[in-house]
Amino acid sequence: MLESMGHKLKIGNNATINLEPDTREETERLFKVLSEGATDCMPLQDMFWGAYWGVCLDRFGIRWMFNCMEKK
């Protein structure tokens, strides 16, 4: 955390758990469950590097990142 940039260290923002599901459907299922009651979400979306990607801070203060590189 960079205090010089206004970041404050607290439980939940000091680590991120990255999930890499095999399909968009599984990514959406996991995101829906983990983002229930969540704050600070970045909705799932197609990204320039080719992934279906999103982030949420769950109701327990755990940050989850989703990165699906589904093979077409």
Image: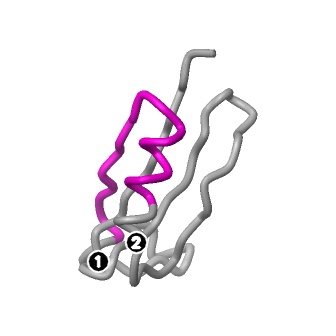
**Mark identifier at residue 42:** none
Left or right, 4 with respect to 18, comes to right
> As rendered, which of 42 and 9 lies closer to the eye?
42
Please report the residue visible at 42 percent of the width from the left and 53 percent of the height from the top.
29
Residue 42 sits in which quadrant? bottom right
Quarter that holds the N terminus: bottom left
Please report the residue visible at 30 percent of the width from the left and 65 percent of the height from the top.
14
> As rendered, which of 21 and 18 lies closer to the eye?
21
Is residue 21 covered in magenta? yes
Residue 50 sits in which quadrant? top right
What residue is shown with label 1? Answer: 61
Q: Amino acid at mark 2?
A: Leu
Q: Are marks 1 and 2 in contact (CB under 8 Å)?
A: yes
Q: Amino acid at mark 1?
A: Gly
Residue range corresponding to the magenta coloring: 13-31
Q: Residues within 10 Å of mark 1 (few under 14, many from 20)?
A: some
Please report the residue visible at 45 percent of the width from the left and 76 percent of the height from the top.
3
> As rendered, which of 31 and 57 lies closer to the eye?
31
For numbered disc 2, what is the local secondary structure? strand
For numbered disc 1, what is the local secondary structure? loop
Left or right, 4 with respect to 45, comes to left
Colour mapping: one colour
What residue is shown with label 2? Answer: 57
Measured from the top left, where is residue 68 in percent x and y?
50, 34
